[in-house]
């Protein structure tokens, strides 16, 4: 699909503001729950609800995009749900477990859904420049995370919501005026699902990525818990998220060259080994700033895993049902994790 120059810059801005917005609410989720007095076990249950909404949401929204051959309207719907859940979560600052398991689940779940829809939307519109588009997203995360930490540390969660609202107004305008993408795939059929269960290579990849994404989840939540235990503040946690996001940008810019030079499985092995190194250092260090420095290894972990995931799932599932295969992958992960 040919994109005009002014529309490309609109897409760059859209990616920047999308990831800036979601980083502002998502990165402060664990500190907020901790401040309200939830225990590690209670936070674990809340995060489990987060994962369930995320997986079912990605499957449902992915199916709807395939079914109606549209993306923008469902992206907008997911973002409106994120806004409502974020306000509900931060405005009611009382320790009510079932209330927060509902609001936090939808807030965190919609973050994952929006990231997945953004990836699909950008690939459909301008796959040639996807690395640059994703780089602008990484820069949005880099800026949004420390701003959120600063606002919470020096003002309040209300100031965080005000800033989130301003960004959301800009973002809603960009979503409304950006080009939609006509999906090239088709809705998943029953024979496709049966085919996935019979596809041993596909199931093997699902198992591999199950364990890798469990590690990635620990990086987002368990490591934050450790930082809070060693008395890191909201600003330091925001900086940790910002550094991780910033380190993704260079790799996304040269992603095309990397994929031409190395085989996907070679990159998958390398990214997994570097995850092991990263978590060894997380466990070894007991200073917030050393943990923040270790987070810089993000450049050789998650972005590489993401790139291999897109290629390998597409390779074993086929072009026509690749989008549905990625959605069904998350449903399988939920079943395996249970």
Image (tube, grey):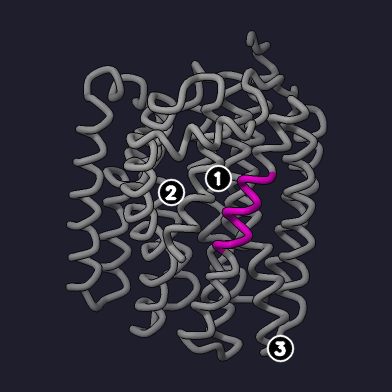
> Which of the pair 108/36 is nearer the observer?
108
The quarter holding residue 91 reads: bottom right
Q: Give the range drawn in magenta.
A: 51-60
Task: State which tag comes first along the sequence, 1 or 2.
Answer: 1
Q: Residue at x 69, y 82 (%)?
A: 98
Mark closer to the observer (1, 3)? 3
- The residue beneath circle 1 is 140
20 left or right of 146 in image: right
Asked whether disc 1 touches disc 2, contact meaning CB atoms under 8 Å apart, the reply is yes
- Prevailing secondary structure class for the magenta stretch in the rendered image: helix
Quadrant in which the N terminus is drawn: top right
Marks 1/2: CA–CA distance: 8 Å
Give x and y (percent) for residue 295: 31, 58
**Residue 332 lies in the magenta-colored region:** no
Please state which of residues 147 and 210 is positioned toward the viewer in this rendering.
210
Circle 2: is it few (<14), some (14-19), or many (20+) Cα within 10 Å?
many
Nearest the eye: 92 or 206: 206
Q: Is mark 2 on a helix, strand or loop?
A: helix
Neighbours of disc 1 within 10 Å: few (<14), some (14-19), many (20+):
many
Dot 1 or dot 3: first in sequence order is 3
Residue picked out by circle 2: 245
Q: Tell me the residue at 61%/47% (across/down).
A: 58
Residue 265 x %, y %: 24, 33
Q: In this view, does 210 lie to the left or right of 162?
A: left
What residue do we see at 38% from left, 42% from top?
Answer: 203
Mark 3 residue element: loop
Mark drawn on residue 94 = 3
Residue 234 position in % (x across, y down): 50, 74
* Above or below, comparing residue 163 to residue 103 in the picture: above
The answer to whether residue 21 is visible is yes
Q: Residue furthest top?
A: 2
């Amino acid at each position: 699909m040919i994109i005009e120059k002014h529309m490309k810059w609109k897409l760059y801005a859209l990616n920047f503001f999308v990831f800036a917005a979601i980083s502002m609410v998502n990165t402060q989720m664990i500190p907020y729950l901790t401040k309200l007095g939830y225990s590690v076990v209670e936070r674990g249950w809340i995060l489990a609800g987060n994962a369930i909404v995320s997986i079912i949401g990605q499957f449902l929204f992915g199916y709807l995009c395939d079914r109606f051959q549209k993306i923008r309207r469902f992206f907008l719907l997911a973002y409106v749900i994120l806004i409502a859940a974020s306000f509900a979560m931060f405005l009611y600052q009382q320790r009510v477990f079932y209330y927060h398991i509902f609001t936090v689940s939808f807030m965190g779940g919609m973050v994952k859904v929006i990231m997945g829809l953004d990836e699909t939307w950008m690939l459909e519109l301008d796959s040639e420049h996807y690395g640059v588009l994703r780089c602008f997203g990484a820069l949005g995360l880099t800026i949004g995370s420390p701003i959120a930490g600063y606002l919470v540390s020096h003002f309040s969660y209300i100031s965080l919501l005000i800033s989130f609202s301003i960004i959301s107004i800009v973002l809603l305008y960009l979503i409304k005026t950006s080009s939609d993408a006509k999906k090239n795939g088709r809705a998943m059929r029953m024979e496709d699902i049966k085919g996935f269960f019979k596809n041993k290579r596909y199931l093997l990849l699902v198992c591999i990525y199950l364990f890798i994404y469990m590690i990635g989840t620990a990086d987002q939540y368990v490591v934050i818990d450790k930082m809070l235990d060693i008395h890191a503040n909201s600003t330091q946690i925001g900086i940790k998220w910002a550094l991780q996001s910033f380190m993704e940008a260079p790799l996304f810019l040269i992603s095309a060259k990397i994929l031409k030079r190395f085989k996907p499985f070679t990159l998958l092995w390398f990214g997994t080994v570097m995850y092991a190194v990263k978590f060894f250092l997380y466990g070894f260090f007991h200073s917030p700033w050393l943990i923040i420095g270790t987070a810089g290894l993000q450049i050789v972990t998650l972005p590489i895993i993401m790139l291999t995931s897109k290629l390998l799932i597409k390779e074993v599932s086929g072009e026509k049902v690749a989008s549905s295969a990625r959605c069904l992958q998350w449903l399988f992960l939920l079943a395996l994790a249970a």
